[in-house]
Image: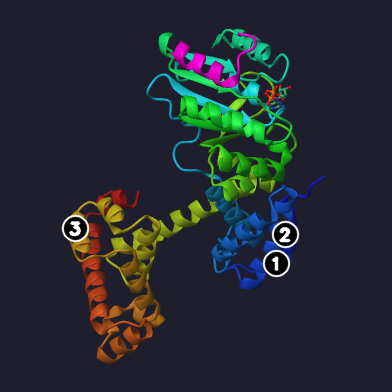
Amino acid sequence: MFESLSERLGGVFDRLTKQGALSEDDVRTAMREVRVALLEADVSLPVARQFIKAVEKKATGASVTKSVTPGQQVVKIVHDELIATLAGEGEPGALRIDNAPAPILMVGLQGSGKTTTTAKLAKRLKERDRKKVLMASLDVNRPAAMEQLQILGQQIGVDTLPIVKGEDPVAIAKRAKTQASLGGYDVYMLDTAGRLHIDAELIQQAADVRDVVNPRETLLVVDGLTGQDAVNVATEFDDKIGVSGVVLTRMDGDGRGGAALSMRAITGKPIKFVGLGEKMDALETFEPERVAGRILGMGDIVALVEKAQQTLEAEQAERMMKRFQKGQFNMNDLKMQLEQMMKMGGLQGMMQMMPGAAKMAKQMDEAGLDDKILRQQVALINSMTKKERANPQLLQASRKKRIAAGAGMEVADLNKLLKMQRQMSDMMKKMGKMGKGGMLKQAMK
Ligand code: GDP
């Protein structure tokens, strides 16, 4: 039914056969399609807009590698941004359950899958984390809710708090807390009552329980198929009760994952788990990659682009290595190194991987070389002519003045850069002499 994003973009970029950098126009056209795809995947409009703005910025001017089309390249950029938006901090699925007995409060609307998820999570904690778990149902409204949890508990071999008729939720919660301490449980899970809609009583009940047990985690269970509604529910629960994480259920259905994106973007809450079916082991840690692939409706293109980029980087590295072995290291090489360093998180990390360069890394560090300086240095190189870059010896006083002015810097800055290029060049020469299979080769690995 849905046309996948890759198909949409394929059409847009069919006429673009030329390779090179993505132009502003290309990107703008592509973004129209991305927007439709996001909306079809049930991403809310403000989130789609915000998302597209971020992608637009990243995609404009991005270079397109030889073995992929511009459309594929854009899909990859969109994919990466989706993952960045979806991923929360910390390890996915991690729960704060130290300090036994740790209370976990489960909240959500009726029918969201709260009781099922409580049992699924209890099973996971028992089997994976070797925790002794106690479950208690606080749902005094829905007939048979308590029995439902009890039966699930028997199925998965997890204890449930004995049912006492006529007790109110706060009393049950207190009893669960006592039982958990006395019984040596690591975790006790409280399955609160649900309603069809959020109402004051429901919220009050959950808040009262929260105040009694002081939960380590308050997990909101929402139906992933309800899209934007799920986000509204999450916002409200978070405002009124405070939520530490979200579980999206029914992600096995034909929902397109847009709810997850809106959820992250709007509430900022981490999605910890996804429910993928009715069975007790159909609960998985939330994987941003998987949901991103689902929103885009394709996985193969991303893999293709990644591979193409790797190939290109390998080709570049190979070419550079050959030149270095001959002792050639000009400003183009330096520029590439600098850009690489920025990508790899700074000079230090990069230099430390090169044997014999540790001392230089230290010097650079002492000289206060950070990303800002790296960018300034690249600007200086950009201000040189092709000839000058290939042959920095050409740089006499007048040329130096022009270059420094072009980059908005002083000649002294340029001199520092030149010194660095000379040092690197010398170092490369030394390494080159060690021959193939020597240090340089190791360093390039
Ligand atoms: P509660 O009212 O929120 O406690 O909801 P329940 O746990 O009773 O779940 C309602 C229905 O949804 C049950 O039939 C569950 O089996 C089903 N359910 C729960 N989670 C999932 C899921 O991840 N996928 C699917 N397909 N069904 C689910």
Disc 2 C-beta below 8 A from ligand 1? no
Q: Verify CB contact (< 8 Å) between mark 2 and mark 1.
A: yes
First along the sequence among labels 3 and 1: 1
Residue 434, x across and y down, in percent = 22, 54
Residue 116 in the image, given as x and y percentages of width and height: 65, 21
Tell me if 250 is positioned left or right of 61 in this view: right
Colour mapping:
rainbow
Determine crowd level at label 2: few under 14, some 14-19, many 20+ residues with C-alpha closer than 10 A. Answer: some
Q: Amino acid at mark 1?
A: Thr
374 falls in the magenta region: no
Q: Residue at x 34, y 68 (%)?
A: 372
Q: Which range is magenta? A: 164-180
Is residue 299 shown to the viewer in this render?
Answer: no
Return the mark for residue 222: none
Q: Quadrant of residue 281?
A: top right
Secondary structure, mark 1, is: helix
Q: Quadrant of residue 250?
A: top right
Percent position of residue 19, x then y = 60, 67
* Residue 169 sits inside the magenta stretch: yes
Q: Is residue 24 above or below residue 82?
A: below
Which residue is the site of mark 3?
Answer: 362
Which quadrant would residue 163 be assigned to in this image?
top right
How far apart are labels 2 and 1 at the CA level? 7 Å
Q: Identify the residue shown where x is 60% and y is 64%.
A: 56
In this view, 72 is above or below 172:
below
Check disc 3 and give the amino acid type: Lys
Question: Separation of disc 3 and disc 2 at Cα?
Answer: 48 Å
Q: Which residue is mark 1?
A: 29
Which residue lies under the disc numbered 2? 33
Identify the element where label 3 is drawn.
Answer: helix
Is 185 situated above or below 74? Answer: above
